[in-house]
Amino acid sequence: MTTPKQTVCEVCHERLATHFVCNANTGKSSHFCDECFETSASAEDRRRSAELRAAHCQYCGAPATIGTMDHLATFTGEQRTMFLCYACSAEFNDYTMLALNRMPHGLSEQEQLEANQQLRQDAEKHMKQWVSERGSQ
Ligand SMILES: [Zn+2]
Ligand SMILES: [Zn+2]
């Protein structure tokens, strides 16, 4: 399991970020400290940050710290935002990256789609098991 590292504000590069904003359309995420959030964040950023603050991790139910685009869902044409806590997002990323690396090359589009759907199911199963083994925080 990866230990989450503290993220520094992307505007001042000094204070720790307390606002995390992910644009589900571009996949780009932004990190602001309180002060820079007040001065630099767009209305859209504010809306997303508020949405994130109200959200809970979809796997363990802890307060969500990351709203990220579900990159597995994009293969199937869905646009879905996943809300995750740090620990679950690190585990989810590790798991899916490893699985994607293991995927054979030269698959047809149809095979790729099926492989991704399978991976998605495997990842869900893995996360549920991982969370139950980890116990609640
Ligand atoms: Zn700042
Ligand atoms: Zn979690």
Image: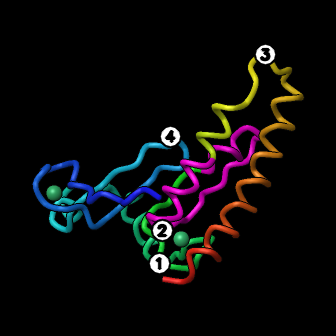
Kind of residue at disc 4: Thr
Q: Nearer the viewer, mark 4 or mark 1?
A: 1
**For residue 77, what is the image quadrant?**
top right
Q: Which mark is residue 85?
A: 2
Q: Measure how far apart labels 2 and 3 are at the Cα level.
A: 34 Å
In front here: 75 or 92? 92
Check residue 91 for magenta coloring. yes
Q: Does residue 38 lie above or below 12 as drawn? A: below
The answer to which of marks 4 and 1 sits earlier in the sequence is 4
Q: Does residue 129 lie above or below 112 as drawn? A: below
The answer to which of marks 1 and 2 sits earlier in the sequence is 1
Q: Which mark is residue 26?
A: 4
Residue 121, image x and y in percent? 79, 54
The answer to which of marks 3 and 1 sits earlier in the sequence is 1
Residue 127, image x and y in percent? 66, 63
Relative placement, left or right, of 39 versus 86 is left
Q: Does residue 85 lie above or below 95 as drawn? A: below
Q: Nearer the viewer, mark 4 or mark 3?
A: 3
Confirm or deny contact between disc 4 and disc 3 (CB under 8 A). no
Residues in magenta, as a range: 70-95
Q: Nearer the viewer, mark 4 or mark 2?
A: 2
The answer to which of marks 2 and 3 sits earlier in the sequence is 2
Q: Which mark is residue 106?
A: 3
Q: Residues within 10 Å of mark 3 (few under 14, many from 20)?
A: few
